Image (spheres, rainbow, N blue to C red):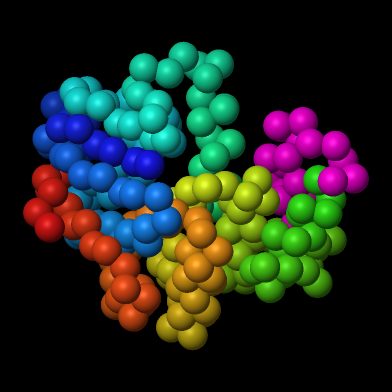
Amino acid sequence: MIRFERVTKRYPGGHEALADVSFEIRHGELVVLGGHSGAGKSTLIKLIAALEKPTAGKVWVSGQDVGSLRPNQVPYLRRSLGLVMQEHRLLTDRTVFDNVMLPLLVTGYPPKDAAKRVRVALDKVGMGAFEQVMPMTLSGGEQHRVAIARAIVNRPSVLIADEPTAHLDPAYAREIAALFRSFHQAGVTILLATHDETLFSPYGSRRIELDHGRLVA
């Protein structure tokens, strides 16, 4: 499903965010990516989503060499991925409904079918009553739920989240952790980058840990 083969990512100026990293995530796994701030977790996620390219080595997603994809091929890769990044990047001039609808419009879903999918996604994250609300009026935790709904509206086979419980109070964080667990139980492959691994350990997740760009566990 996802495989890293001796991947190194070096940025201009010489900073090495990842160094000789190799691992595999199989279909249907729930994997927690741990490590200190600056360990390379966000870079690793960006490589999977083709937001960055490796300096050396190969990143494989569903049999595709992500680093060799042409620009016009990248959108097809991302259709199978649900991404929840640290920055929600919700459009402040559009309603919650329109924000979640956006990925479906980009991929050309018929509007009637798309609307149904949006409402299902919002219901799954407990935001069904907020579809006509503007994002800026929501709390941080509620905005996070909208971002998750946007990530799952395409019904991706892989869901990747970068610090999904950061800056949330403990009760909200547990709810978000349980939400990701429910997606995993539905058969979605999950990769979560987080400082708080204890939230997900009760779910029998597998752990990958980075330390200064190197895989240590």
Say how many tags the image has: 0
Q: Position of residue 173 (x, y in %)?
A: 46, 76
Q: Residue furthest bottom?
A: 171
Residue 145 placement: quadrant? bottom right
Magenta: main secondary structure: helix
User: In which quadrant is the N terminus drawn?
Assistant: top left
Residue at (26, 45) in percent of width and height:
24
Q: Position of residue 167 (x, y in %)?
A: 43, 70
Provide the residue span drawn in magenta: 91-113
Name the one closer to the observer, 85 or 65.
65
**102 is within the stretch colored magenta:** yes
Instruction: Indicate left or right for 144 with 17 as reference.
Output: right
Instruction: Indicate left or right for 5 with 72 as reference.
Output: left
Residue at (58, 36) in percent of width and height:
79
One can see residue 50 in this view: yes
Q: Position of residue 114 (x, y in %)?
A: 81, 45
One can see residue 192 in this view: no
Q: Position of residue 185 (x, y in %)?
A: 50, 68
Residue at (46, 80) in percent of width and height:
174
Residue 88 versus residue 1 in the image, above or below: below
Residue at (53, 35) in percent of width and height:
78
**76 is within the stretch colored magenta:** no
User: In which quadrant is the C terminus drawn?
Assistant: bottom left
Residue 12 placement: quadrant? top left
Q: Residue furthest right?
A: 112
Instruction: Indicate left or right for 95 with 172 as reference.
Output: right
Residue 169 versus residue 84 in the image, above or below: below
Name the one closer to the observer, 1 or 67.
1
